[in-house]
Image: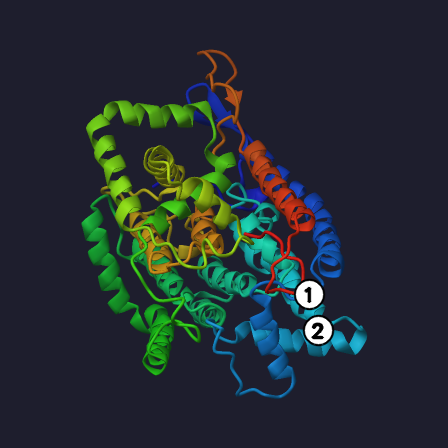
Amino acid sequence: MTTQQPPETDQIDESPQLISPGIQRVLQREVVAGFLANLVIYPLLVIYFIGTFSFVTRRVVPYVFIDEQFHVGQTMQYLSGHWSSWDPKITTPPGLYILGWVSYKLVSVVTSWTALTAFRLVNLLGGAVILPLCVLRPLFLFNAIGFWPVALMCFPLLSTYYYLYYTDVWSTIFILQSLSLVLTQPYGPRASIWLSSACAALSCTFRQTNIVWTVFIMVIALERRAAIRKQFNTHRFNNYLKLFIHSIDEFQDTVLPYVLNFASFLVYLIWNKSITLGDKSNHSVGLHLVQVFYCFAFMALFSLPLWFSRNFLRLYVIRLQWKPIRTIFELLGIMLVIRYFTVMHPFLLADNRHYTFYLFKRLIGSHRRIFKYLLMSIVYHFSTFAYLEVLRPSEMKFDPVAPLPIKDPIDLPIQLTHISWSCLIVCTCLTIIPSPLFEPRYYILPFLFWRLFVTCSAEPIFGELVPAKEGETPITVTSTKRLFFEFLWFMGINMVTLYIFATRAFTWETEPFLQRIIW
């Protein structure tokens, strides 16, 4: 089985490790560099987000913006004591509004800030403090060469909402905390599983589709125990059977906490007669298959620092050359999906306050067939390749005969097996395909769940990787540059989108305030 190095620096061999002939890594140096980078960058990021939050809230949009009108209005109803009141236009549960109520009650005691600022502060604190320190930091300690918390807290699709009163930030925090508890087990196996279930349940009070990610987290919890106790091997179908048997053996300790969530959600579905609260007419479930390719394209864009290299691009070209017939059929299949499973929601081309409006109008939904079918099918094909191939080296492998040398699930590397990898793809599809809306924020969780299990490549971003000749000192490679590049990439996108948001204003006849462009 391929394993990552333990996270503690005092347990990592200080000597270089030969990873292939003529190539070596010094893992301790990478770990130390990561810790130092996070220690230096994090306080600067907090200052940046506080400063830009103040700028956005006071000068750019000191008024409710797009969907904030519904979220703010509902929270004001709660502040007025009307707890049974509900705006039928709202489609998500009231978790955010309860947090907003708490925030306003606390903030109003010590400041004279407006209610809108107090509500938005919930997401700023969540994204700039709770997410990196409470959710990502424990995972980072177990996977210090996999990702940097300071980079993921800047993920553009998520950090955009640190300035606004939307549900996405805390929905993400609670469901990722559910995963973190399973992987790190800070309170022991049993208590951590129950707390994980509780966090998953809380996340569903912000966004109902998180019930799908609860399934993924349960599979992670099961397989990390089954892999050891049932001795997974290279027979993949047998591993599925072993996982199923283990789920029966461990039902009370591992499965039951999540089953209670599923049962509660079933009661909700029966009561509501739909997964969507409120405005069901504009959020009906459909078969929007091309949504998967939208998602993979966004993920390929944001993960560019992880895959960009001459060697990776060469691998794609080699695949095209080795499997030309298969590639043609894959491209034709993508074209058929574009033709017959593209949903044009009325909101898409009626709201120019979103980047998706311009993407669809000028590229994705272009009337020019060479763009719509040929160009986009190639983009989607490469994006799917990148999604799969970036994660493939991080898959947990098993020996066909020898038992695992690990006896405790907490000692397993932060990696997916073929089972959880399949589950990740299925859960991604289940959360985005039914949605008729082309909303990039729906891709936040698919990206983060994927990214957390990717071990960053140590291959140079630019130039060729040329191993040292026999007898010479092996060349040293590191993932530090790629991780830093990922942070800079996210921050660059954030600054560009913030600049556009602040400077590109326009009017709507139906709105009293200036409108702006957002994800």
Rendered location of residue 314, percent (x, y): 38, 23
Q: Amino acid at mark 2?
A: Ala
Q: CA distance from mark 1 to mark 2?
A: 11 Å
Residue 393 shown left or right of residue 52 in the figure: left
Rendered location of residue 363, percent (x, y): 43, 40
* Residue furthest front as drawn: 509
Q: Nearer the viewer, residue 163 or 512?
A: 512
Residue 311 visible here: yes
Element on which disc 2 rests: helix
Residue 4 visible here: no
Residue 205 shown left or right of residue 128 in the figure: left
Residue 156 shown left or right of residue 259 in the figure: right
Q: Nearer the viewer, residue 412 or 390?
A: 390
Q: Earlier in the sequence, mark 1 or mark 2?
A: 1
Q: Which mark is residue 7?
A: none
Relative to 394, residue 17 above or below: above
Of discs 1 and 2, which sits in the foreground?
A: 1
Residue labelled with disc 2: 115
Rendered location of residue 332, percent (x, y): 24, 37
- The figure's colour scheme reads rainbow
Q: Amino acid at mark 1?
A: Tyr
Quadrant in the picture for residue 72: bottom right
Residues tagged 1 and 2 counted as in contact (Cβ below 8 A) = no
Relative to 216, residue 111 above or below: below
Residue labelled with disc 1: 63
Relative to 246, residue 357 above or below: above
